[in-house]
């Protein structure tokens, strides 16, 4: 929407200045439009936030230069182009809600500071080349109207987004209190193809509407601060299921991996809650694997390390998920009581796409093995990927090649079939 609005405004003013035969501004608008198109292409290739920030930077620079060169205030005719800086700042704020970055915040601040400077000072320089006087009142009024309309549109869009998020948050709270969440289980297998565990994956089953994947509600739940409550529900449900598994010979040996978010881990009673659940269900902590992502290293690392060691002393095991996608974890590997790293699926697919991808995946696996950690390859989708990652030393595997996440009844069926297949092999 932001790109479309910018395009409409640019094309509109392009037509105006073609009629006025002001070719310098026409050329500058064509350059602006071409640059904005490049930003749009970047956004459409999966880098939406980056593309939008580049577009903001370009439009902000153009507005500032235009204010200094062409939109020079005169008696009775105020400068108005700087009003667009408010709309650019608003677009930046909306983008900041999607992805919190310092660059985006800096752009917002720059837009607001520039707006304040132009609003409080005339800033008329000798090098300015103001527009012809007869057109100035009309152009100034048009700028004021357009900037106000765009600003109102942005506010309405924010209100609609806020209302949508509020409604979804209320629905998530309702789901939590009315037991609409369910756990699915994706099998984890060893090099021989024998199932030795599962990863518990959260799903939202809306009555009458079907299953909702976590990508559609987890971000909203995190923004609303609901993940600790949802995480507590996951832990209770997972321990309850593990207690049933230990009474069945086909599942008594299985471990269960549980994903832990940063805000859940940082709860003061997190450690006590896990210990209490293990005692209440009589489940051995060694059968529980807590999966953390590298985002935990962006918080209070000393508290994280202390909690991990306290749980490890009780028998819980830790796995580092999506390993290799960041670098912050490397300096902490020697301090953390990890037993496993999970190589991110992007490296698994790259391992069979070319020699460079294979070298990267091989060295990630080798690093884990030399650190005496179990190395799990996640996202296995083909027999070739399985074979290659086995050759690199991985001893645990997960992916659609073996099974998609399963309901508990289907998981039990899969476990029985896998046990029979391994026994007859």
Image (cartoon, helix red, strand yellow):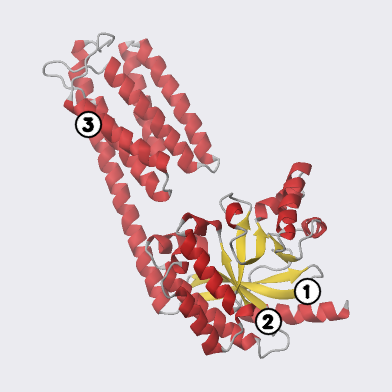
Q: Nearer the viewer, residue 26 or 273?
A: 273
Query: In this figure, which residue is indicated by the disc labeled 2?
Result: 412
Q: Is residue 75 above or below residue 90?
A: above
- Left/right placement of residue 151 relative to residue 403 reads left
In the image, residue 381 lies at what x, y percent?
72, 59
In the image, residue 192 lies at what x, y percent?
82, 70
Query: In this figure, which residue is indicated by the disc labeled 3?
Result: 116
- Left/right placement of residue 69 relative to residue 378 reads left
Q: Nearer the viewer, mark 2 or mark 3?
A: 3
Q: Is residue 256 above or below residue 247?
A: above
Q: Secondary structure at mark 1?
A: loop
* Residue 39 in view: yes
- How far separated are the C-alphas under marks 3 and 1? 66 Å
Query: In this figure, which residue is indicated by the disc labeled 1?
Result: 194
- How far separated are the C-alphas under marks 2 and 1? 14 Å
Look at 31% across and 33% down and name the residue there. Answer: 111
Of the two numbered discs 2 and 3 on the same chain, state the one appearing first in sequence: 3
């Amino acid at each position: 929407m932001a790109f479309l609005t910018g395009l409409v405004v640019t094309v509109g003013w392009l037509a105006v200045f073609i009629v006025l035969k002001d070719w310098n501004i026409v050329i500058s608008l064509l350059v602006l439009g071409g640059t904005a198109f490049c930003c749009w292409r970047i956004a459409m290739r999966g880098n939406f936030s980056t593309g939008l920030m580049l577009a903001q930077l370009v439009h902000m620079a153009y507005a500032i230069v235009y204010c200094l060169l062409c939109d020079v205030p005169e008696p009775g005719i105020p400068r108005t182009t700087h009003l667009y800086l408010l709309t650019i700042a608003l677009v930046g704020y909306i983008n900041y809600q999607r992805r919190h970055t310092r660059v985006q915040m800096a752009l917002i601040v720059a837009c607001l500071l520039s707006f304040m400077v132009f609003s409080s000072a005339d800033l008329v320089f000798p090098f300015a080349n103001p527009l012809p006087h007869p057109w100035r009142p009309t152009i100034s009024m048009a700028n004021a109207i357009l900037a106000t309309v765009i600003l109102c549109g942005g506010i309405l869009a924010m209100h609609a987004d806020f209302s949508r998020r509020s409604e979804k948050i209320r629905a998530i709270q309702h789901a939590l209190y009315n037991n609409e969440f369910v756990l699915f289980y994706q099998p984890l297998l060893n090099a021989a193809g024998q199932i030795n565990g599962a990863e518990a994956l959260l799903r939202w089953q809306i009555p009458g509407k079907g299953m909702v994947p976590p990508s559609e509600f987890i971000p909203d739940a995190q923004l609303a601060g609901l993940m600790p409550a949802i995480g507590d529900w996951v832990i209770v449900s997972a321990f309850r299921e593990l207690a049933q598994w230990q009474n069945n010979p086909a599942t008594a040996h299985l471990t269960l991996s549980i994903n832990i978010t940063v805000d859940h881990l940082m709860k003061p009673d997190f450690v006590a809650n896990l210990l209490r659940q293990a005692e209440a269900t009589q489940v051995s902590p060694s059968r529980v694997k807590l999966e953390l992502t590298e985002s935990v290293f962006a918080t209070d690392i000393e508290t994280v390390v202390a909690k991990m060691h306290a749980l490890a002393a009780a028998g819980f095991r830790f796995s580092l998920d999506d390993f290799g996608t960041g670098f912050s974890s490397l300096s902490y590997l020697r301090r953390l009581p990890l037993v496993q790293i999970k190589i991110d699926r992007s490296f698994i697919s790259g391992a069979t796409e070319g020699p460079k991808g294979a070298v990267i995946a091989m060295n990630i696996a080798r690093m884990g093995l030399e650190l005496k950690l179990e190395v799990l390859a996640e996202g296995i989708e083909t027999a070739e990927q399985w074979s290659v990652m086995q050759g690199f030393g991985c001893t645990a595997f997960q992916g659609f090649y073996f099974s998609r996440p399963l309901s508990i009844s289907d998981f039990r069926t899969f476990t029985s079939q896998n046990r029979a297949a391994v026994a007859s092999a």
